[in-house]
Image (cartoon, rainbow, N blue to C red):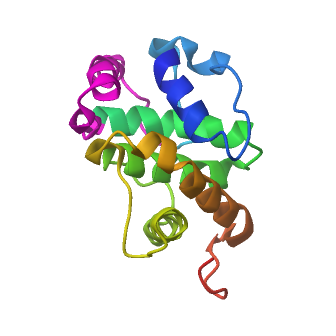
């Protein structure tokens, strides 16, 4: 679990320091999300599947990131990363959803799907200078170094445009 958290820490570095793995997720078998995520808890078998796939994905085969269990794990850890970076719960949920999408291609919707899609466009524009382009960790290893600027752009957009009532559409994309 620390390996995944460290990768998220590097990816989020342009936004801030997410610190050490939160104590509430260290024992994954006790991890529940009833109050905050209003979803089924991440099962121990899902976490094992994600952790088993993470190492080969990170080391030499990024296609392994394109596994649903990795998406679920990143989504939940992404929520805690968002909280550590100062986001309130609803914004942190959106951040976790979006991180799961860009790393694995999979996420379970907790936030507005339009907001997740908008973040994808904002990050793509920041990284590639093209709103039609998006990055995915499972498409190549340069994602981890090049996508920090995309994470910063997405995070800034969440802070300024996502309210508890949803995504603000009265502003042009950043």
In this orientation, which residue lies closer to the viewer: 70 or 102? Answer: 102
Left or right: 96 with respect to 165? left
Vertical placement of residue 88 versus 42, above or below: below
Q: Is residue 75 above or below residue 57?
A: below
Q: Nearer the viewer, residue 79 or 152?
A: 152
Q: Is residue 145 left or right of residue 140?
A: right
Q: Is residue 30 left or right of residue 63?
A: right
Q: Position of residue 5 (x, y in %)?
A: 54, 25
Q: Residue at x 54, y 34 (%)?
A: 8
Q: Residue at x 70, y 47 (%)?
A: 15
Residue toward you, 30 or 119: 119
Residue 34 position within the rendered picture, expressed as x and y whole percent measured from the top left? 54, 35
Specify the segment rendered in magenta.
Answer: 39-68
Residue 128 in sight:
yes
Position of residue 108 relative to residue 16, above or below, is below
- One can see residue 108 in this view: no
Q: Residue at x 44, y 76 (%)?
A: 131
Give how far across and how far down residue 44 sits, in percent: 36, 17
Q: Answer with the quarter of the image where residue 165 lies.
A: bottom right
Q: Is residue 106 left or right of residue 12?
A: left
């Amino acid at each position: 679990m620390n390996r995944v958290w460290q990768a998220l820490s590097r990816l989020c570095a342009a936004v801030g320091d997410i610190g050490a793995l939160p104590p509430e997720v260290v024992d994954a078998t006790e991890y529940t999300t009833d109050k905050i995520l209003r979803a089924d808890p991440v099962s121990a078998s899902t976490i094992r599947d994600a952790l088993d796939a993470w190492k080969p994905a990170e080391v030499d085969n990024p296609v392994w990131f394109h596994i649903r269990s990795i998406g679920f794990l990143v989504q939940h850890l992404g929520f805690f990363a968002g909280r550590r970076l100062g986001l309130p719960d609803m914004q942190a949920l959106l951040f976790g959803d979006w991180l799961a999408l860009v790393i694995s291609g999979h996420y379970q919707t907790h936030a507005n799907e339009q907001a997740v899609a908008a973040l994808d466009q904002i990050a793509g524009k920041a990284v590639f200078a093209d709103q039609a382009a998006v990055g995915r960790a499972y498409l190549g290893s340069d994602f981890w170094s090049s996508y920090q600027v995309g994470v910063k752009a997405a995070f800034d957009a969440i802070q300024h445009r996502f309210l508890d009532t949803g995504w603000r559409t009265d502003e042009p994309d950043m």
